[in-house]
Amino acid sequence: MTEASTAAIVVGRSADLPEGGRLVIDVDGFEVGIFRVDGRLYAWENRCAHHGGPVCQGMLINRVIERLDGEQQSLGDDFSASLNIVCPWHGYEYDVCTGLHPGDAARLTAVPVMEREGNIVVKL
């Protein structure tokens, strides 16, 4: 979609997307995943930067991190507060709030999203 084709579209009611929830919508063949995290909305094109998989339909998990001691020796794995979405095709993970992959330059394509008069609105 081009900047010139930007249109505000109501895609659902705010009350229908609870904290930690997701809504995946299709607007004329353009799929968008919308997430509510810490009271804020984040929206991404439902297309993985790796190979185009339906990333927004993947599992939501806290990012796995390796704990290290003062000498950089492993203390095992733990979970961070960062919430990731995992593409169901190849397991690529992205931070739901930033759209960034933790290990390389891959990122999801952001879609402008807001709440207006009790509705969720995206700009496409």
Image (cartoon, rainbow, N blue to C red):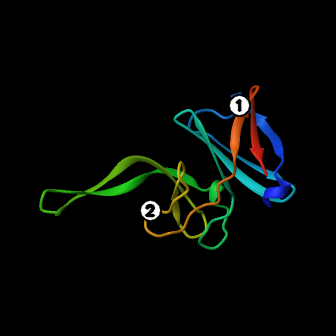
Q: Relative to 30, does residue 14 appear above or below in the rendering?
A: above
User: Which numbered dot is residue 79?
Assistant: none
The residue lying furthest to the bottom in this view is 51
For the residue marked with disc 2, what is the amino acid? Pro
Q: Position of residue 97 (x, y in %)?
A: 53, 48
User: Which numbered dot is residue 102?
Assistant: 2
Say left or right for 105 vs 67: right
For the residue marked with disc 1, what is the amino acid? Ser
Q: Quadrant of residue 85?
A: bottom right
Identify which residue is drawn at 49% across, 63% down.
101
Instruction: Report the residue marked by disc 1.
Output: 14
Say left or right for 47 vs 123: left
Gap in Å between the C-alphas at discs 2 and 1?
A: 30 Å
Q: Position of residue 117 (x, y in %)?
A: 76, 26
Q: Depth check: 113 or 94 in front?
A: 113
Say left or right for 16 vs 7: left
Identify which residue is drawn at 87% across, 56% down.
28
Residue 101 seen in render: yes
Q: Relative to 40, does residue 43 appear above or below in the rendering?
A: below
Q: Quadrant of residue 52?
A: bottom right
Of the two numbered discs 2 and 1 on the same chain, state the one appearing first in sequence: 1
Q: Position of residue 39 (x, y in %)?
A: 56, 32
* The N terminus: image quadrant: bottom right
Q: Element under label 1?
A: helix
Identify which residue is drawn at 69% across, 38% down.
114
- How many residues crowd mark 2 within 10 Å: few (<14), some (14–19), many (20+)? some
Q: Element under label 2?
A: loop
Q: What count of labels does the image hold?
A: 2
Identify which residue is drawn at 79% across, 52% down.
124
The residue lying furthest to the left in this view is 71
Residue 1 seen in render: no
